[in-house]
Structure formats: structure tokens, C-alpha cells
Amino acid sequence: MILRSLATFAIAAAFSIPAHAEETRLNDLRIHNSFARATAPKQPAGGAYVTIENKGKANDALVGASSPVAKSVEIHTMSMEGNVMKMREVGRVEIKAGERIEMKPGDGYHLMLMGLKQPLKAGESFPVTLVFEKAGKTDVKVTVRDAAAGHGGMHHGH
């Protein structure tokens, strides 16, 4: 009985979070589903994720990011090679015309928030400025989710 109630609650909670709660438009780019994982006290870094869609006919690229919650923001890519998680900083993320880039925990691109000034707490939000090669700069609102939400975690060394 308790398990059924917990399962019902978990399903209801999952559907109560809008998938595209806030969308930012910058020329032909659509940025949405911006979120970060909650961090532990004194954790020096955290991950943030966005989905970027290029609705235009010209290619563009994400070339930088910044946020007041961290000393710096780096664009990283992550992949599994055998049983080893490999992460590296990349200078840019190409976003071809008509393409969608979905940053998500555990696979592909993410924004690495380096030198966090305070822990990221679930339910809070903060701004991130994204810099695109052609479209320019835009601010997006990033919502902090519980670290247990979704799959995987940011359990790797830097």
C-alpha cells in the first residue's frame, strides 16, 4: 500500500514539472529546458544543461557562457570509453541549421560551473549568459533540480 502511494506520488511529481517551462528566443535560436543539479555544501563545481534548437537556415555555435553563481563556466563534453567516463572542455558547440542540441546529465555536452560561490539548492534558479558566434548573447533562467532527479550524476573528478 505504501509503495503504491509512493509510486503514484512519483508519477504525479514527474508530470507536474513542465518540460519547457521557459523558452528564450534569440534570432533563430530557441533555448529551453534549462536546469542544473543541486550541489552539496563546499562542492566546487556543478553542471547545467540547456536544449538549443536552431530554427534558421544558417549554422551558429555556442562559444561561451558565464554566470554570477560561478567564477567561470566552461563548455564540456562527456562520454564513456569502456568503463571510464571521459570529460573534456570544448571551445564551442556547433548548432547546424535545423539541428537540436540537448544537453543532459551523463552524456554529451554540458555547462560546467567552476568555482561555485555557494551551493545550488533545489527549487532555486539563477541566470546564465550564453554567447553565440552569430546570434550574440542572451540570458537564460536555470532552475535547480534535486540531484537525484533524472539519471546519472556528476560524480567525476576535475
Image (cartoon, rainbow, N blue to C red):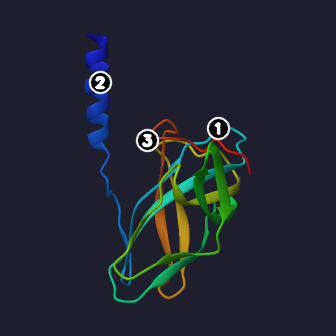
- The answer to whether residue 69 is visible is no
Q: Label 2, on which residue? A: 7
Position of the N terminus, as image quadrant, is: top left
Q: Nearer the viewer, residue 135 or 22?
A: 135
Relative vertical location of residue 65 with respect to residue 96 in this rendering, above or below: above
As displayed, is residue 82 above or below residue 40? below
- SS of the residue at dot 1? loop
User: What amino acid is labelled 1 in the image?
Assistant: Ala
Q: Nearer the viewer, mark 1 or mark 2?
A: 2
In the image shown, does 5 or 93 lie closer to the viewer?
Answer: 93
Q: Estimate the x, y position of residue 45 in percent, counting from the top left.
A: 68, 50
Q: Earlier in the sequence, mark 2 or mark 3?
A: 2
Q: Identify the residue at horizontal 28%, vertical 42% (top origin).
A: 16
- The label shown at residue 49 is none
State which tag comes first along the sequence, 1 or 3: 1
The amino acid pointed to by label 3 is Gly
User: Disc 1 designates what residue?
Assistant: 40
Mark 1 vs mark 3, CA separation in Å: 17 Å
Q: Please report whichever mark, 1 or 2, sits nearer to the chain's N-terminal start.
A: 2
**Which residue corresponds to the image point at 54% horizontal and 85% vertical from the top-left?**
133
Percent position of residue 42, x then y:
73, 41
- Judge the density around disc 2: few (<14), some (14-19), many (≥20) Cα neighbours within 10 Å: few
Query: Toward which corner of the image does residue 33 lie, by quadrant?
Result: bottom left
Horizontal and vertical percent position of residue 124: 49, 47
Measuring 70% from the left and 52% from the top, which residue is drawn there?
117
Check contact, mark 1 vs mark 2: CB within 8 A.
no
Residue in the foreground of this view, choosing between 36 and 150: 150
CA gap, disc 2 and disc 3:
15 Å
Pointer 3: what residue? 150
> Is 48 located above or below residue 100 in the figure?
above
Say what secondary structure mark 2 lies in: helix
Cβ–Cβ under 8 Å for marks 2 and 3: no
